Amino acid sequence: MQFSSGCIRNMELKNRWLMLAMHTGFAQGNALTEREFAFYEERAKGGAANVTMVLGVNDAGALQGMHHADTLSAKSLQELAHRVHAYDCKLMIQLFHCGRNEAAKQHGDKPLLAPSAVASPIFHTEPKEMNMTDLEETKADFAKAAVFCKENGVDAIEISASAGYLLSEFLSPLTNQREDAYGYQNEKGMTYPLEVLQAIREGVGDYPILLKVSGAQMLDGGYELTDTIVFCRKAEAMGSIDAITVTGGWHESPVEQISYHVSKGGYAPFAAAVKKYTTVPVIACNRIHDNATAERLLSENMCDFVGTARAFLADAYFVEKMQKHEIFNPCQGCNRCIMDVRKGKELHCAYCPEAGKEYMENQRRKIATRKEVLVIGGGPAGMYAAKKAAERGFLTTLVCQEKQLGGQVQLAKLVPMKGDMAVFLEYLEHELYRLGVQILLQQKADIDFIMEKKPYLTVLAMGSTPVVPQMEGLTEGTYCLAQDVFQKADLSEYSQGQTVIIGGNPLGLELAAYLKDNIPTANIKILEQSERMGKQLGAMAKPLLQELEQKNVQMMCGTKAIGIEGKKVYIMIGEQKFFVAADHLIVACGVQSVPSSDLTMLLMDERLSYAVLGDQDHVADIDAALQSVFDLFSRFYLA
């Protein structure tokens, strides 16, 4: 069903997969750039029924790095429409106003406007309460922007009234404390958003208008699903909308919205409820990234279309590949894209460095050469390096000392709700075979091996090795490494006694989640020297820590392990010395780069080109590792 055609008003869509809006931060000047053209064109080429670009309705409503309708070149918008139409793909523009939701330092001298002067808990800046002039001008700007889109080749517009941006702020008693006709006490704050929608309809006439809403605010005291349904029904009754896109809560909601902690299609019931009480087509979104999920939601009549943004970011061709039953690079729900955009940075994908760089990739021709690239290391950095080398046309050999490719990702895929990491490895391995990379497993790339090949370029990506802290009594046999626990076939020993994990970094936390998933009765205590657990995870730490707390994992911050004696782990908390019982001791103190000085010295002596990438260069995360590879191979311009 997902590959059947469908209609929204008079707009025919070739399939049921809609590419939803993403703020890219790519905007420069008053016209779309080749970078932006290439970004959307690639996804049109990849099978999307439509692509959606975000457009601020005016300067005050646009985020940093976002075009706005006041100044955007009509000619460049026409060019974008022309490019995507070449692939039987429609162009949709989401008309957007950020309201209070941007950091003041990123918003410049423009005022942050909102229904009331209530600060965002994310950005903490008190916005300006909109006066009547602000309200009328903003309404007019929505309508004017809609007409601008219609006149310049855009096939449909979507009005953003979700996630805590301006129009949705009128719908919530938490953010709308006005006492005038637009206050929450009057029609639950729906008056102004409905006026905006009506003004847009009057401006564009017979033209597809979509409304994007959050199914519920998902905050204590906020609006609920029944309120959203009433709002949508009123908009439909007025003839103001032709379809409804239904997402989850707001960005500030305490529950996860789009990370891997949300089950696939987890918010589709919101869409199903809206669909039940309206007659226009409904688009479900949030964590819909694969064939099976889409087919299930459509066949169960929970929605008429499925929408996703980040799946198109991770793999521009994922719809075409699904239709051809080919493997694709799946969105991992890691939220790196969201975290960067919130900080005013450009959009990027941790697992697809090409995203947003298509204009650069399109400039590179395959190298006509018989030169060889040797990649040493079978982790994600090594696999991606071999992929990029082969794409550039080099004869590529990948040498892996282990019996399987994947490195640390072979462990990460075992963590609860991170099973798509296995698909990422399958995708990379598929790409290597497709590109003709020679893969040598269980092969040590020593000096003799390298000298026999004398490659044009040697990539050192041997990754990292576990860190074992120096402390009294910590000797072989007294502990187990976290990496080894992940690989154990039988975990039953952890069902009895106290398990102590030294290290509250991502490795230690995810190991605890893995153990609790397999042995719910496991009694686990995590010791972390710093004052914060999982600080390397950023915003993604919160749902993991909440999960561990719910499963009764004891987490002790500001606790330094200083020694081992039998089944006791001695610790320091401040200036006080204590001990904790440990029937099972697991060390999860991170990793360090595998030494490579002998190889680098040889390569320098022999004047052979080499590069050190990923954890081999410096220990970081998969995002930084893949980016280092992309940066290296971006420098190959040979024809």
Image: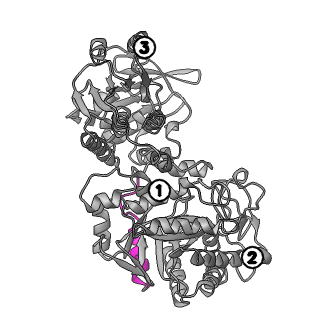
Q: Position of residue 52 (x, y in %)?
A: 50, 66
Report if the CB atoms under discs 3 and 1 are less than 8 Å apart: no
Magenta residues span 255-278
Task: From the image, tell me which residue sits under label 1.
Answer: 256
Task: From the image, tell me which residue sits under label 2.
Answer: 137
Q: Name the main secondary structure of what is drawn in magenta.
A: loop
Residue located 43% across and 24% down the image = 611
Point out the frontmost of discs 3 and 1: 3
Point out the frontmost of discs 3 and 2: 3
Name the element at disc 3. loop
Give the mark, 3 or 2, whose residue is nearer the N terminus: 2
Residue 408 seen by the camera: no
- 145 relative to 5 in the view: left or right: right
Give the mark, 3 or 1, whose residue is nearer the N terminus: 1
Q: Is residue 525 shown above or below 480?
A: below
625 or 204, which lies in front?
204
340 or 131, which lies in front?
340
Residue 364 seen by the camera: yes
